[in-house]
Amino acid sequence: MTNLTIARLSATARRVPDGPDPAPRIAAMLANLAADRLDAALVGVDLPAGEWLVRRLDVTVPLDLSAVDGELERQWAGHVLAALRAALADGGAVHYATDLDALVDVLAGCATRVFDRSWAWGSLGLTGADPAADPARAALTALDRHPHLALAALGRVADRTGWPALHRLFGARDWPPVADLVCRAHTGAATDWRTPGSPTGDGAADRARAVVRGSALAGAVRRSRLRVDAATARAWAVLVVADAEPGALARHAADGVLARVADLLTDPAGPVARHPGTDRSTSLDRSPARDHGPATDHSPVDRHDPAGDGAAVRAGSSQDRETWTSPDAAGSTGDRGVPDGSGPTDRMTSPVTHPPAGVPGNGPEWTDARPRPDGPTRNPDAPAGPEPADRDGAPTVWAGLLFLLGTATAAGVPAVLLDDPALTTRPLPWVLHALGRLLVPAAADDPAVLALAGLSGPAGAPDGYPAGRSILADQPPADPREQAALRAHAHRWAEATATRLHPGPRADIDPGTGADPGADPGAAPDPGSLPEKAARPPADPMPVDAARLVREVAARPGVIVADRGWTEVRLALDGVDVDVRRAGLDVDPGWVPWLGTVVVFRYV
């Protein structure tokens, strides 16, 4: 479907000498043209998805006023549509495939003081009348329109222009408001990040180093070599923590990790990070400073008409985004399961001995296997899925794993994970990644498992984004206490999912842990408000029916299309599951703040 929005539509008609005044008739036809005829002419028009904006379109339309009005209106609409097609084809339009693309264009334009598309920004309501008068204020206004996209937009602009350009835009005055926007988007409330927390021992320092290594944004900041005041450094630290570990942002503002991150961002002696798929380092070496490295151009079509008022066309509803295919990440946590260091024979206790028909694997296991040198690790028993050559996304046979986001709140995720004393030293993405591999027997680099941990990203992006995958390689193997805690949380999540799919009295689960199908999966519940069962790790092994049910739900081929701040799960239309639909598990989760991304499901 294509929607056409016109800011102002006017017509000028020549009057025949001594003839009747055509103005009333022309005005009536113009109203019908706007109300109905243009919509009818647009039926069947196939444009790439997104916003198409034309600043001005002048159309000469020969009309025989002796004809009936309906026929004249159809002719008029045809002429307008032909002129619009010509404008889109010859570069007389600006195209934004997504809201994020538009936001990136605003920030990049304001940062580089290039305002030739400011009319388009105003047409979308992103900025005021004159962004050039106060670029920082215009950029903040645009970020405030889409706060959940702010971090992703800053990352893209840093790739394109370098961090110094962004610092020149915001400076010491406006970085704190940017950090406030990001905090509200990821925590749902104002967070006191301005007051440094109290770092406690080596734990906070180690966690801070892991955060810096796990953030692509940190690399851009550190390469800039900028010397800034403490308040600005802490504002940057907010962005870096939200980039690497969004679910723990509020926690790290209080426990001193954020303050340690601020120190590392301006400390030349900080940690060196090698991100998968890149040979760059986020450490400060003694080579000449660089504003930015080679960047993937995420900019919208750089085309505009220099005069006029403005029209916008919104095409389609699907997202056209760059994607990445999971690489063979050095130092991966292995072929299946979270390694405990004891070798591939140390299996997780589970009563599931034989999988149901059509469901791969026989339950999670702890292994110390490493990725094979000839390519990514794979589960040989996994069902057949899309070919890896699919250039529109990263294929997986566990696409249904993301349905579990619909039961995250009922399972206490992420609150109970952050509060578990056995896991306090572990980054939340590492914990979520481990839980994904306990819930399904997937490879460490499976796109669905990475997406569940918030570690998905496009191929070829600067610095091997997402740098957060280094969190997995940098972490030591899980010890027995951590393994037990992870099993308990996986059990709880599986039970919450089973309860949602098959509600009703059950002997092995408190019905109070169920949740309404319309509940927001992005909301992080107060641990004190959770039912007692949800807040207490179960002592017994995962029940057979819950473990099997999760694998049945998750085992479906699909494609993960991911970018900064966006995760799209594409599934086959003929694979719609009535039970999943009835339980509301394939309702779009939308913005999930503790993952730092929007998640949507698309049946194609």
Image: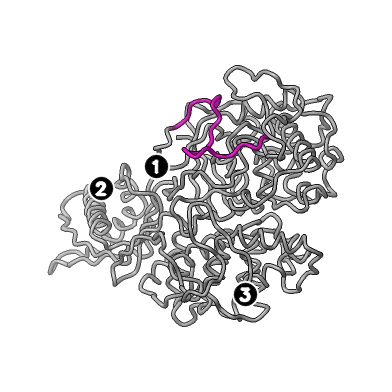
Q: Main secondary structure of the magenta part?
A: loop
Q: Where does residue 337 sit, x and y in percent of width and height?
A: 66, 36
Q: Earlier in the sequence, mark 3 or mark 2?
A: 2
Q: Quadrant of the N terminus?
A: top left
Q: Quadrant of the C terminus?
A: top left
Find residue 356 and report its image quarter: top right
Q: Where does residue 565 sit, x and y in percent of width and height?
A: 54, 54
Question: Which numbered mark, 3 or 2, is in the foreground of this view?
Answer: 3
Residue at image position (53%, 31%) is 397
| Residue 373 on the magenta segment | yes
The answer to whether residue 482 is left or right of residue 59 is right
**Relative to residue 350, is residue 529 depicted above or below?**
below
Residue at image position (34%, 60%) is 301
Callout 3 amino acid: Thr
| Residue 362 on the magenta segment | no
| Residue identified by numbered label 2 | 70
| Residue identified by numbered label 1 | 391
Instruction: Look at the image and give the residue range highlighted in magenta.
Output: 367-386
The local crowd at label 2, few if under 14, some if 14 to 19, many if 20 or more residues have their Cα within 10 Å, is few
The tally of labels here is 3
| Residue identified by numbered label 3 | 266
Q: Where does residue 453 sit, x and y in percent of width and height?
A: 62, 46
How far apart are labels 3 and 1 at the CA level?
39 Å
The local crowd at label 3, few if under 14, some if 14 to 19, many if 20 or more residues have their Cα within 10 Å, is many
**Disc 3 on helix, strand or loop?**
loop
How far apart are labels 1 and 2 at the CA level?
46 Å
